[in-house]
Image (cartoon, rainbow, N blue to C red):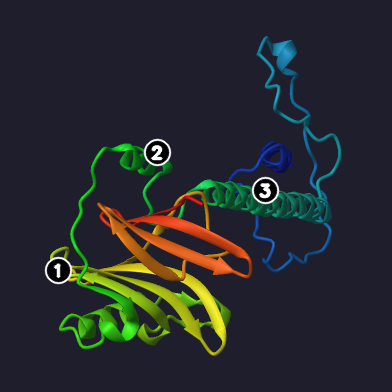
C-alpha cells in the first residue's frame, strides 16, 4: 500500500502543470480486468520507528499501515490513482488546445501586419521612387487588348496566366486573357503590361506585368493599399521611366504613375 500512496503523490505532482502524463510502473492499466478474489486479511507486524533507531525519516514515505490490508482496499487505491491520472491527462489536452489557439492568434496577427505576398517592402519602394533615374524604354503597343493578340509572345502569355491562376474575385473564377481591356508592350523592354479586368458586366482592378524572357507574371505593387475608387482603367503618356494611368468613376477622376521597371503603381491625384 505504501507503493500506491507514493505513486499517487507522484501523479498529483503532474497535475500542477501541462506536461507528459505517465502511469507509474507497476500500476495496472485502467483497462485491465478487475481482480476478483475473496477478502484476505494480512497481519502486519509493526516495525521500529526510524526516529527510534536513529534513521532519517523519508518525508515522501506514507505511514505504515496499522490494520489489515485487503484486496478491496488495494483495488480502491488503484481506482483512485487511475482517476487521478485520467484527470491529469484531460488537463494536459486542455493545455495543448489553449496553446494551439494562442499560436494561431499570433500567426494571424503577424500575417495581418505583413505586406502583400512577394511585394517589395514599403521602405524599399520609397527608396526606389526617390532615385533620380529609372529604367526607360519605348512602348510600341499601347491601347486595346486586340493590339497584342497577334504578337508572337501572346500565346506564351496566355499559358503563363493560366498557370498563375489569378482570381477574378467578383466572378469567383480565374482571370482570363480576354478579361483585360488594355495593354502596353515594349519590344525593347521585353515586357507587356495588362490592365483590367472586365467581363459579364462586372469589373475589377488588375494590372499585371509579363516578362518575355522569363515568361513570368506578377501583379503590380500599389503603394498605400488597394484601389477601391476611380481605379486605373486607361493608359496615358510615357514620361521617362513611368507610364501615366488614369481612372474615372462618376465625377471622381484619379491619376497614377506606373514605374514599369519595378512594377510599382503610385496614386498622384
Q: Residue at x 52, y 74 (%)?
A: 204
Q: CA distance from mark 2 to mark 3?
A: 41 Å
The reply to whether callout 1 and callout 2 are in contact (CB within 8 Å) is no
Instruction: Give the mark nearer the N terminus: 1 vs 2.
Output: 2
- Image quarter of residue 45: top right
- Whether residue 227 appears in this view of the structure is no
How packed mark 2 is, by other alpha carbons closer than 10 Å (few <14, some 14-19, many 20 or more), is: few
Q: Which residue is mark 3?
A: 95
Q: Residue at x 67, y 39 (%)?
A: 17
Q: Which residue is mark 2?
A: 123
**Front-lying residue, 93 or 152:** 152
Q: Position of residue 206 (x, y in %)?
A: 44, 70
* Dot 3: element: helix
Q: Position of residue 201 (x, y in %)?
A: 57, 87
Q: Residue at x 39, y 84 (%)?
A: 176
Q: Nearer the viewer, mark 1 or mark 3?
A: 1
**Front-lying residue, 114 or 40:** 114
* Dot 2: element: helix
Q: Which residue is mark 1?
A: 213
Instruction: Give the mark nearer the N terminus: 1 vs 3.
Output: 3
Amino acid at each position: 500500500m505504501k507503493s500506491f500512496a507514493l505513486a499517487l503523490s507522484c501523479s498529483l505532482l503532474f497535475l500542477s502543470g501541462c506536461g507528459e502524463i505517465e502511469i507509474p510502473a507497476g500500476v495496472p492499466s485502467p483497462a485491465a480486468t478487475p481482480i476478483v478474489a475473496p477478502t484476505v486479511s494480512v497481519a502486519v507486524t509493526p516495525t521500529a520507528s526510524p526516529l527510534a533507531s536513529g534513521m532519517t525519516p523519508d518525508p515522501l514515505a506514507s505511514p505504515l499501515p496499522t490494520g489489515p490490508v485487503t484486496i478491496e482496499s488495494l483495488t480502491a487505491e488503484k481506482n483512485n490513482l487511475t482517476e487521478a491520472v485520467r484527470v491529469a491527462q484531460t488537463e494536459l489536452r486542455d493545455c495543448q488546445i489553449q496553446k494551439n489557439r494562442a499560436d494561431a492568434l499570433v500567426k494571424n496577427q503577424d500575417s495581418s501586419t505583413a505586406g502583400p505576398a512577394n511585394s517589395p517592402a514599403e521602405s524599399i519602394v520609397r527608396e526606389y521612387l526617390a532615385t533620380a533615374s529609372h529604367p526607360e524604354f519605348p512602348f510600341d503597343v499601347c491601347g486595346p487588348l486586340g493590339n497584342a493578340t497577334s504578337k508572337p509572345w501572346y500565346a506564351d502569355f496566355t499559358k503563363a496566366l493560366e498557370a498563375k491562376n489569378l482570381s477574378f474575385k467578383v466572378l469567383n473564377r480565374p482571370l482570363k486573357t480576354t478579361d483585360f481591356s488594355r495593354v502596353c508592350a515594349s519590344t525593347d523592354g521585353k515586357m507587356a503590361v495588362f490592365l483590367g479586368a472586365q467581363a459579364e458586366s462586372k469589373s475589377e482592378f488588375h494590372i499585371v506585368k509579363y516578362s518575355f524572357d522569363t515568361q513570368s507574371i506578377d501583379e503590380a505593387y500599389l503603394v498605400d493599399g488597394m484601389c477601391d475608387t476611380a481605379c486605373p482603367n486607361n493608359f496615358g503618356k510615357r514620361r521617362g521611366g513611368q507610364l501615366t494611368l488614369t481612372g474615372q468613376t462618376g465625377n471622381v477622376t484619379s491619376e497614377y504613375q506606373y514605374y514599369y521597371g519595378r512594377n510599382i503603381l503610385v496614386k498622384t491625384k
